[in-house]
Image (spheres, rainbow, N blue to C red):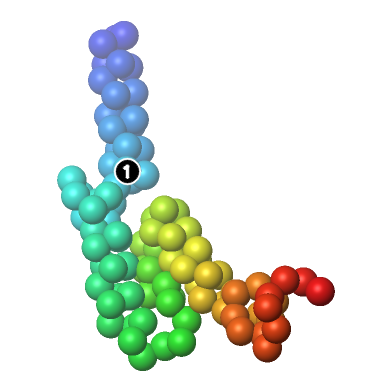
Amino acid sequence: MARFRRARKAYRYAGKARRYGGSIGGKFGGIIPPVLGGLADSFINPKSPINGVGSAAIGWFMKSNTTRDIGLYQVGASLAQYIPGIGGSSGNNGGWL
């Protein structure tokens, strides 16, 4: 009887691992989101004034935190150039004052 319970428990945990494991891409699931994010950025960046939108979107939809964070970092760096005194040309020598 104990052997049956162990087998049933192992089967249940294997099902959970399949369900919550890398469901997108199988064995290469960690490779696919960054590659798709890079492809999306190379397609979108020349057409948009804000860089990183493609990586952020791919990371968001594929649930890849690293790809999403890299994309959002690029978006933030691109937006900084539009804020006077931080990254863009504000007409003076820069700085906050």
| Residue 2 placement (x, y as % from top left) | 31, 9
Residue at 27 percent across and 50 percent down: it is 30
Tell which residue pokes out farthest to the front in this image: 93
Can residue 40 be seen in this snapshot?
Answer: yes
Helix, strand or loop for disc 1: loop
Whether residue 20 sits left or right of residue 86 in the image: it is left
Quarter of the view holding residue 17: top left
Decide: is 75 above or below 44. above
Decide: is 48 above or below 69. below
Decide: is 31 above or below 40. above
Quarter of the view holding residue 56: bottom left
> Toward the viewer: 38 or 83?
83
Decide: is 39 above or below 32. below
> Toward the viewer: 8 or 25?
25
Whether residue 1 sits left or right of residue 79 in the image: it is left
- Residue identifier under label 1: 21
| Residue 18 placement (x, y as % from top left) | 28, 42
Disc 1 residue crowd, few under 14, some 14–19, many 20+, Cα 10 Å: few
Residue at 36 percent across and 82 percent down: it is 45
Q: Quadrant of the C terminus?
A: bottom right
